[in-house]
Image (cartoon, rainbow, N blue to C red):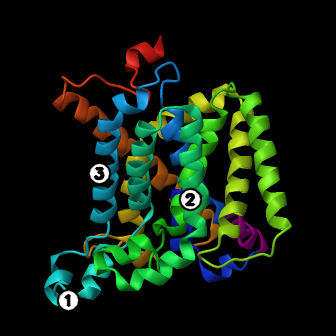
Amino acid sequence: MAMVLGHTLDALLAPVTRDHPWVQRYWEFRGITAPLFLLVSGWAVVAALDARRPDAAKATYGRRVQRALLLLFLGYLLHWPGWDTVLTQGWGDSLLSHVFAFDALQCIGLSLLVGATLLAVFSGPGSRAVALAVMAVGVPLASTAAWQASPHLPAVLQQAVGGAASHFPLFPWAGYFFAGALASSCLRLLRSGWPQGLALTVLGLGLMGLTHLCTADWSPTSAWLVALRVGEGFLVLAAMNFAPLWLSSALAPLGRVSLWVYVIHLPVVYGWAGTPGLSQRVGPTLGLGLALLAGGGLLAASFLLARLGQWLRGLTLPWRVGSTTLGVGQGAQRV
C-alpha cells in the first residue's frame, strides 16, 4: 500500500502541494518504505518455513528458486523499453543499462535465491543465524568496495552490484533482506503478537540508539544508514505485531496478491514499452486530495485485476491445489 500510494503521489503531486509542510514530513517518512519492502521480504522467507520440519528449507528449495526467477523476470520485463527504442538505440551500452537497470524486484529475487540456498545448506538454528548475520552485516560493510569495482564489470552486471545509476543495487540493499531474515530466524521461537512485538521494539530502539552514537552518514553505500533504516523497520514490524488480528485478516487478501499489485501499478504510473503512464499523461499537476484519490483507485484496481488473474489461473490450471506461502491448502487454512 505504501509503495503504490508513494509512487502515485510522487508522479502526480503538483510542486506547490509538495512544498506543504505535511507533505514534506510524509516525504521524510517515505524513506522507510523501500527498506521495509526488502526487510519484510527477508522476514517472510524464514517465517514461511514449517518450524516442525528441520528439512523444510530443502523441501521448498525448488519452489523458492522458481519464485526468485519469476521476480527477476518480472523485474527486467518492467524495464523493457519497446522495440522502437531498441531499433533507435541499437544494442549498445545505453540500451543495456536501461534494460538491465536493477530495481526492487531484481534485488529481492537474487537475495531470495541466495537466502534460500543458505537456509537449505545451514539447517541448524545456530549455523543458520551465523550465515544470515554474515550477509546482513557483511553486505552493507562491503558496499563501498563493491561500488568501486562495479565499473569494471560487464554492463549487464554493473547496476546489480552497485552504482549511482541503480535504484536498488545488491550492495547495500540486500542487507535489508538478510537483516529481516536474521531477525525472523532468531525470533521465530517467540509467539507472534506481543512477545515478538516487544522483542522487535527492543531491537529497533537498540539499533537506532547505536546509530545515534556514531557519525551520521547519508551516502548511498552507508552501513550506518542501513542500520538506521533496519531499526526503523523493526519498529514498524513491532507495531504490526501489536495490531489486532482483525486488521491482519482484513489485509490478508491484499497481502496474498501483493506481488501482482506491485507489478501492475508500475506500468500504470511510469509507463511501459514506450506507452506513457500517469507521470507522462497527467504529470505533477494534482492537489493532495485528487492525488490520494488516484492512488487509492489505482490500488483498488490493481488488487481487483490481481484477484481476477488469480481466478482465471484457477480455471485454466484446475489441477493445481491452491496454497498459501506455507504450502497449506486454502480449504485447510479456512478450517
Q: What segment is highlighted magenta in the picture?
A: 21-30
Report crowding for label 1: few under 14, some 14 to 19, many 20 or more residues within 10 A (C-alpha).
few
The answer to whether one can see residue 223 in this image is yes
- Outermost residue, top side: 335
Which of the 4 image quarters holds residue 25? bottom right
Q: Earlier in the sequence, mark 2 or mark 3?
A: 3
- Residue carrying label 1: 89
| Distance of label 2 from label 3 (alpha carbons) | 20 Å
Residue 90 colored in magenta in the image: no
> Of the numbered discs in the image, which one, if any, rests on residue 69?
3
Q: Nearer the viewer, mark 2 or mark 1?
A: 2
Residue 217 screen position, x and y as percent: 72, 77
Q: Given the image, on which type of amino acid does mark 2 rest?
A: Gly
Nearest the eye: 201 or 142: 142
Q: Secondary structure at mark 2?
A: helix
At x 51% / y 59%, what residue is drawn?
174
At x 66% / y 34%, what residue is drawn?
187
- Residue carrying label 2: 175
At x 74% / y 41%, what residue is drawn?
200
At x 36% / y 43%, what residue is drawn?
306
Side (left or right) of 192 relative to 110? right
11 in relation to 116, above or below: below
Q: Secondary structure at mark 3?
A: helix
The answer to whether one can see residue 1 in this image is no
Residue 26 screen position, x and y as percent: 71, 65
Nearest the eye: 312 or 297: 312
Q: Given the image, on which type of amino acid does mark 1 rest?
A: Gln
93 in relation to 171, above or below: below
